[in-house]
Amino acid sequence: MSVSQPLRELISNCTLPANEARILLAHLLEKHYQLPRSALLSRDDMTLNVAAQEEWQSLISRRVIGEPIAYILGKKGFHNIELLVGPGVLIPRPETELLVDIALAEIAKLNKPTKILDLGTGSGAIALSIASASPLASVVATDQSAEALVTAQQNAKLLNLTKQVQFLQGNWYEALIQQSQFDVIVSNPPYIADQDPHLTQGDLRFEPSSALTDYGSGLSCLQAIISDADRFLQPGGLIAVEHGFDQSESVINLMKIAGLVDVQAHFDLAGHCRAASGRKLKNPII
Ligand SMILES: C[S@@+](CC[C@H](N)C(=O)[O-])C[C@H]1O[C@@H](n2cnc3c(N)ncnc32)[C@H](O)[C@@H]1O
């Protein structure tokens, strides 16, 4: 039993990689002692009290079986905000920040109050990042999952964004209570095919399957969102969706079939094509 081990030995003797051990220990130092992460170095001879020591063992056991660090800590950084996350919501991924940046560039271009729709908001990651970064954005964020919407609303409260972001429950556009037209639609829908082996590996094993897979080919949610976008976009309005690394061609085709113009592929920081955007015609032919 390692009750009296100093912090440096807790890290060096831990079965987890040192970077993960440091993250978990920093979390305990903040929770039990209100100490900053720098205490891992400045007070590396400190020992944990019994309660913190017991929690340390429990955190290690959870991580050893593969539970994602974000669920263990109950939070995740995304774009310029921090979000509460739990097993009922997808853990926001860095590649999804691409959609936030696309929306923010459009708001900057329009330079006027901008109506945004985020379909399948999960923790509220995309909707709240956009609202937090731009006072010009007013956002409607939807999800089919009541559990996800509870977390998203908690996040909106903590970030003081409840006036700027409205949450609605329902199946894609059916959640909208009035026929609105938006300047920008963004969505990171489930796009993993139901037979994809990744669903049974790593972090994905712990995340809600309804946030990951469409239980089909991987393209059905993207198709539903893209094919109806025209009805919910202002003339000239923009839709941007995230997709899998090998779905770019199919999603671009779906956008062209839907009659969208200025269709573009977007690359994440790692150079992977992970999003597509298109516009409703400015002067639709009637
Ligand atoms: C990949 S997660 C994205 C979550 C969040 N936008 C993000 O990027 O972190 C997909 C989200 O779509 C929601 N969803 C799945 N099917 C839906 C449907 N038919 N209508 C509305 N939302 C749906 C899931 O509950 C989940 O929150």
Image (cartoon, rainbow, N blue to C red):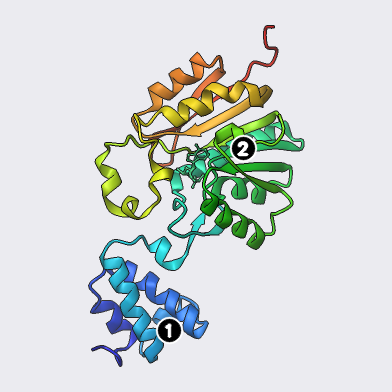
Does the beta carbon of the residue at mark 2 sit less than 8 Å from ligand 1? Answer: yes
Q: CA distance from mark 2 to mark 1?
A: 51 Å
Query: From where the camera sits, is residue 233 visible?
Result: yes
Query: From where the camera sits, is residue 46 visible?
Result: no
Task: Name the quadrant of the N terminus.
Answer: bottom left
Mark 2 vs mark 1: in front: 2
Q: Which mark is residue 19?
A: none
Residue 240 place in picture, x, y as percent: 54, 31
Foreground: 175 or 245?
175
SS class, disc 1 = helix
Q: Is residue 202 left or right of residue 151?
A: left
Q: Amino acid at mark 1?
A: Ser
Q: Which residue is mark 1?
A: 42
Q: Tell me the crowding category of disc 2: few under 14, some 14 to 19, or many 20 or more residues within 10 angstroms, Cα based.
A: some
Residue at image location 49% in from the left, 85% down from the top: 33
Residue 18 place in picture, x, y as percent: 29, 70
128 vs 62: above or below: above
Q: Which residue is mark 2?
A: 175
Residue at image location 53% in from the left, 17% down from the top: 258
Residue 32 place in picture, x, y as percent: 47, 84
Does the beta carbon of the residue at mark 1 sit less than 8 Å from ligand 1? Answer: no
Residue at image location 31% in from the left, 82% down from the top: 8
Q: Is residue 64 left or right of residue 87?
A: left
